[in-house]
Image: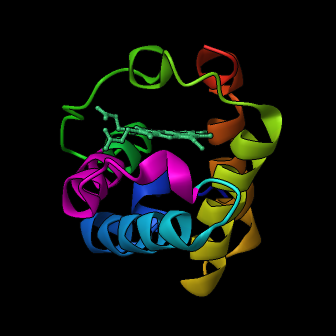
Amino acid sequence: MTNEQTLFERLGGAEGCAAIAELVVENHLKNPDINKRFLDSDPAALKVLVRTFFAAGTGGPNEYEGRDMVTAHTGMNLNEREFVSTIDDVLAAIDERGLDAGVRSEVLAILYSFKDDILFR
Ligand code: HEM
């Protein structure tokens, strides 16, 4: 059997991506490994960027209007622990939404692919 739904659809579409973005930003703000990085961030604005980044990157209809990953993270000198910690926050959000293991591993693979754009810049 082929799965013809996009990852965006399997994430629950626009509503699903919005719910995940909400949880991801809340998780980051509670996460002692990384929350100091977000002291100057506006959570509401960040939720919009995370939502559209997710939706656009998984086959959704909208455009992502934020910065590219190199530009957004340059000057932060982020390390591996912080990188893994942000990904864990996304996986926790996916688990909280009750999404299946296939969706979870596809999202993980996409996020991991940004490693060289984000680390130590
Ligand atoms: C796979 C890993 C990551 C992804 C996909 C990701 C994604 C994003 C996106 C989409 C933005 C918005 C871009 C913009 O501001 O125009 C952003 C901004 C940002 N990210 Fe990341 N990020 C990742 C890892 C990290 C890590 C490890 C940290 C620090 C612990 C971090 C801290 C930040 C901060 C501080 C901002 C700016 C927020 C603001 O301007 O308010 N990110 N990231």
The question of residue 41 being in magenta is answered with yes
As drawn, is 58 to the left or to the right of 27? left
Q: Position of residue 2 (x, y in %)?
A: 64, 55
x, y percent for residue 95? 66, 79
> Please, which colouring scheme is shown?
rainbow
Per the rendered image, the range of residues in magenta is 35-52
Is any part of residue 98 visible from this angle?
no
Q: Report whether residue 29 is seen.
A: yes
Q: Nearer the viewer, residue 38 or 20?
A: 38
Q: Quadrant of the N terminus?
A: bottom right
**In the image, is residue 85 above or below residue 76?**
below
Closer to us: 63 or 85: 85
Give x and y (percent) for residue 28. 53, 63
Q: Where the C terminus falls, by quadrant?
A: top right
Residue 93, picture quadrant: bottom right
Left or right: 16 with respect to 104? left
Q: Looking at this rendering, what residue extends furthest in the right direction?
A: 81
Q: Quadrant of residue 82?
A: top right
Q: Between residue 97 and residue 12, name the one nearer to us.
A: 97
Majority secondary structure of magenta residues: helix
Q: Is residue 34 above or below residue 118?
A: below
Residue 113 in magenta stretch: no
- Residue at image location 70% in from the left, 49% down from the top: 108
Q: Residue at x 63, y 21 (%)?
A: 77
Give left or right: position of 31 versus 12. Answer: right
Residue 94 pos. (x, y %)? 59, 72
Residue drawn at (53%, 53%), measured in percent from left and top?
36
